Amino acid sequence: MIISDDFFRGVRIDTPVTAGFCGLGREAPENLASSFSRSARRITPKMIVSNDGENAAPFPLTATDRELLVLDDIKFQPHTWDELKQIIGVAHLNLPSRTEHLISTTAENRLEVLKRWPSDLRRYAQWGAETKAIYGTIPSYVMQERLHWQPLPSSTPKTGPIFELRNPTPFADPNDYKILPNDWPYGLAPGITHIIVWLKHRLEVEPSRGDMTSKSRTQVQQFVQTTFVDKVRDIPGYEDKVQWFKNWTALQSVPGLEHLHVLVRDIPQDIIAEWTGGEEMVQGKV
């Protein structure tokens, strides 16, 4: 199925942006992930545009998305490292000096302005429609094809996927999380790599908007420090090589599947491959 640029020009969807893994969808229906395999029959989805321009796209399109969809890549300005720090919001908090430069805060968080290359956004829209037609939801695809995690039978659409844990403490056991490249990263300047850390745990959040608590923020910070920052200590300027953020619950693009985002700059490929287990981005393969 090919989605032309003309398809998007009249689209009007006034839904909030979701930052993070480039795939949207609600919780997977019970046992959905176990219902499909790679041999599943390919289904061609139908994209519907109503008379008033509202469309049943595979994910919400923001005002920024609509502007990008009619642009050529040559007119696109990728996010620089310093711009990402401003967008994510990095603050020096009252923490030990070895970690304070990495703390991400939502005080100035403007994740809604993160953008993708126009050509990537168009391809992602097509991929999202095809993937949801086959797997039902993007979370189902991620669980089955990227993480190879099987939810427990007790999982329901209300609870989201529940997984068997090796250790009740987040990040304590490598079997309880997986580090992968972002399959559909944002439009980033050369040298910047976007990584996703998927967790079987649910990190603690505050109830009002699902932002991280001090406890969960510290857990993530310690993990990022030991896993990513300490790994690049021999590289000059290592203290400014890593940024991270986690979406509020309301902004999560893959609800129910806990994940955080790590951005690294000018890191040798062999180190990135060690983090991701040699996994590469997967685009357009359903």
Image (tube, rainbow, N blue to C red):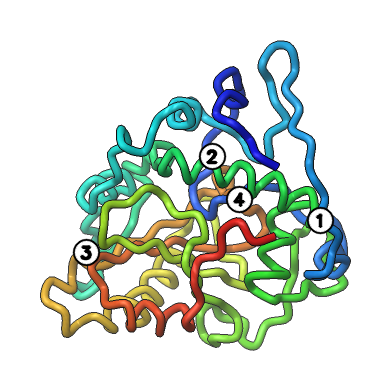
Which quadrant: the N terminus? top right
Query: Cα distance, mark 4 to mark 1?
Result: 19 Å
Query: Which residue, given by chain and number where applicable, does mark 4 sit on?
Result: 23
Query: Cα distance, mark 2 to mark 3?
Result: 35 Å
Query: Which residue, given by chain and number where applicable, does mark 2 sit on?
Result: 122
The residue lying toward the viewer, choosing from 268 and 74, is 74
Q: Tell me the number on the disc at residue 42.
A: 1
Judged from the image, the secondary structure of the residue bearing numbered disc 2 is helix
Name the residue located 51 percent from the left edge and 77 percent from the top edge.
279
Q: Tag 3: Cα neighbours inside 10 Å, few (<14), some, or many (≥20)?
A: some
Q: Earlier in the sequence, mark 4 or mark 1?
A: 4
The residue lying toward the viewer, choosing from 83 and 258, is 83
Give x and y (percent) for residue 223.
40, 77
Query: Which residue, given by chain and number where applicable, does mark 3 sit on?
Result: 101
Give x and y (percent) for residue 191.
26, 62
Q: Nearer the viewer, mark 2 or mark 3?
A: 2
Q: Earlier in the sequence, mark 2 or mark 1?
A: 1
The reply to whether the C-beta atoms of the residues labelled 2 and 4 are less than 8 Å apart is no
Judged from the image, the secondary structure of the residue bearing numbered disc 3 is helix
Judged from the image, the secondary structure of the residue bearing numbered disc 4 is loop
Query: Cα distance, mark 2 to mark 1?
Result: 20 Å
- Give the residue type that dot 3 points to: His
Q: Earlier in the sequence, mark 3 or mark 4?
A: 4
- Give the residue type that dot 4 points to: Gly
Is residue 196 placed above or below 73 in the rendered structure?
A: below
Name the residue located 57 percent from the left edge and 49 percent from the top edge.
252
Q: Earlier in the sequence, mark 2 or mark 4?
A: 4
Give x and y (percent) for residue 270.
33, 83
Query: Cα distance, mark 3 to mark 4?
Result: 30 Å
Q: Tag 4: Cα neighbours inside 10 Å, few (<14), some, or many (≥20)?
A: many
Decide if residue 158 is in sight here: no
